[in-house]
Structures are given as C-alpha cells and as structure tokens.
Amino acid sequence: MKYKILASDFDNTLVPFGEKSPRPAVVDAVQRMQAAGGKFVLSTGRAYSALQRPGQLGGIRFDYAITCNGACVVDREGAIVAEHPLTAEEMYALTDFCDDYSYALQFNFRDAYYAYAGYEYLSALYARASGSGLGCKDGEDRDRHLVDMPHAAFLVAPPEAVEKFGEKYGYLGLHFMRVGGTGPDGWNSYDVVRQGMDKGTGLASLCAAMGLSLSEAVAAGDSANDCGMLRAAGLGCCMANGTPDAKAAAD
C-alpha cells in the first residue's frame, strides 16, 4: 500500500458544518482503510479535550490526533507523541494584549479550554454554535497554567488586532490563523500557536515517530489552517467548497 496514513481535518472535512458527526459513507470508508492496515489521523485546531464528546466521530476511532493545529500530537489514549506548548512569555503577551483592548482570549490546555479574558463573550459564542460541542471554563483567576502550559490560544478580536499585536510583540513570531466567519460584531476568530507550528509540522512529527516518510501520508482539509498539512503530505486533497488558499496547497 503506497499510502500508510490518512490525516483528515475535522470541521467541514470529516464532519460537515451544522452536522454532529461524520456521515455513514465516511465512517465506512475510514473503517475499511483501517481494516486494510492504514492509520487514521484526526487533524484539528481543537485540543484533545474537545474530542471526547460521545458519538462525535460516529463509529470512527482515530489512531492518532494532531491537535491544536500541530502543537500537540497524541495517540488515541491521549498520550503525547510530540508537543510544542506556548512559553510563559508568549502566554503573558497574549493576556496583556487582550487586557489592554478588552478582547476575548482562551487558552487550550490538555484538560479543557480556559477563558482568561472575556469568559461571558466566549460562552455566548459557543452557545450560538451549539452543534459544535465546544465550550470553555471560566479561567479568569488565571492559575491553570501553573499546572502546565497551554498548547495554543484562541483569540476573538477585530481584524486590525493581529497587526496591532505584531507591532508590539512581533518578535515572538506567534502564528495567527483565522478560523470561521466574521461575527455579527465584526470580530474575527483566530487560533494562535508558536512560530513554525501548523498541521504540517504535526504531521511531520507523527510520521517521524512512526518511522514513515511524508510521502506515505494523505491529507484532507478545507481551510487556511490545513494548508501546511496539504503541502506536506504525499497527497493533499481539498474539499470542493474549500478556501482558495487550501485549494492552491492541495495536489
């Protein structure tokens, strides 16, 4: 078998927007691939903690998961294969920035999402996306990072916020990836990870750990945060309704 693993994005790739789980034909295809010896890798901006909802994957059991846009790779039991958590300096810079401008900020820890700023705003955002199964804890006491550091952040702010952050903290090189559409207030949502991190980096780390080459991997996705993975894999496949940059990154 030329290809040994399939890495698939979650939202709008494995599971269509507005639906709660993969369609039966998708479940069947993944299970047949696994029965033939292939490995299925769920690749997502979500943290491992956000992949635990019963029935979320239909009958699919992933072998590995690339979580937090490549910043944390785990096996199906949650054991870490590779990780690149935010540093204290990076975390504090994001927190100070969001405090200065009253933006909403969440950090993605291993056990849950914690809102360090704008808890009520983020809770309302998740309530509107009720089918996503996502939610956050009130972390405004800001002590969760004393246990371990988050792998990623989630920022909701107006479009000019990324440029503003770069003017003050550009030396950190943090990677901002816009996700989803613009909210009714004109604000955008951004996943934030360390410099050089994306799903392609996560896929490369996983392949190295498995003793595989990237040429033996297939990747499927639909949006900007999938581009690194689509370019890195031996075969990159973009959904028909994917973004222009994702289509350009695919084969």
Image (cartoon, grey):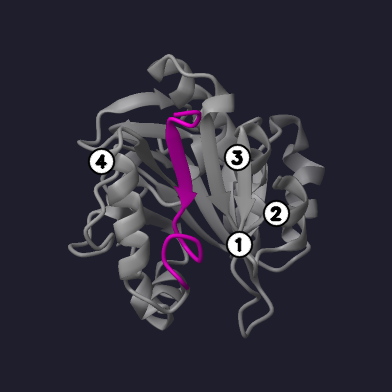
Q: Which residue is mark 4?
A: 35
Q: Position of residue 220 (x, y in %)?
A: 55, 50
Question: What span is colored magenta in the figure?
Answer: 1-16
**Does residue 134 appear in this view?**
no
Residue drawn at (58%, 46%) of the image: 192
Q: Quadrant of the C terminus?
A: top right
Disc number at residue 239? 1
Q: Residue at x 21, y 58 (%)?
A: 59
Relative side of 170 to 146, left or right: right
**Element carrying mark 2:** helix
At label 4, counting other C-alpha atoms closer than 10 Å, the crowd grade (few under 14, some 14-19, many 20 or more) is few
Label 1 vs label 4, nearer the camera: 4
Question: Neighbour class for label 1 at 10 Å: few (<14), some, many (≥20)?
Answer: some
Within-10-Å neighbours for mark 3: few <14, some 14–19, many 20+? many
Q: In what element is the residue under mark 1? A: loop
User: Considering only order in the chain, which callout, 4 or 3, is on the residue closer to the N terminus?
Assistant: 4
| Callout 1 amino acid | Met
N-terminal of the two: label 1 or label 4? 4
Q: Residue at x 61, y 50 (%)?
A: 237
Q: What is the distance, in whole Å, between disc 1 and disc 3 at their CAs? A: 14 Å
Question: Can you tell which mark lies on residue 229?
Answer: 3
Q: Is residue 205 magenta?
A: no
Q: Real-space Cα distance between discs 1 and 4?
A: 24 Å
* Residue drawn at point x = 50 percent, y = 36 percent: 70
Callout 1 touching callout 2 (CB < 8 Å):
yes
Q: Which residue is mark 2?
A: 246
Of circles 4 and 2, the one toward us is 4
Q: Is residue 150 above or below residue 191?
A: above
The answer to whether the residues at label 1 and label 3 have Cβ atoms under 8 Å apart is no
Q: Is residue 115 left or right of residue 57?
A: right
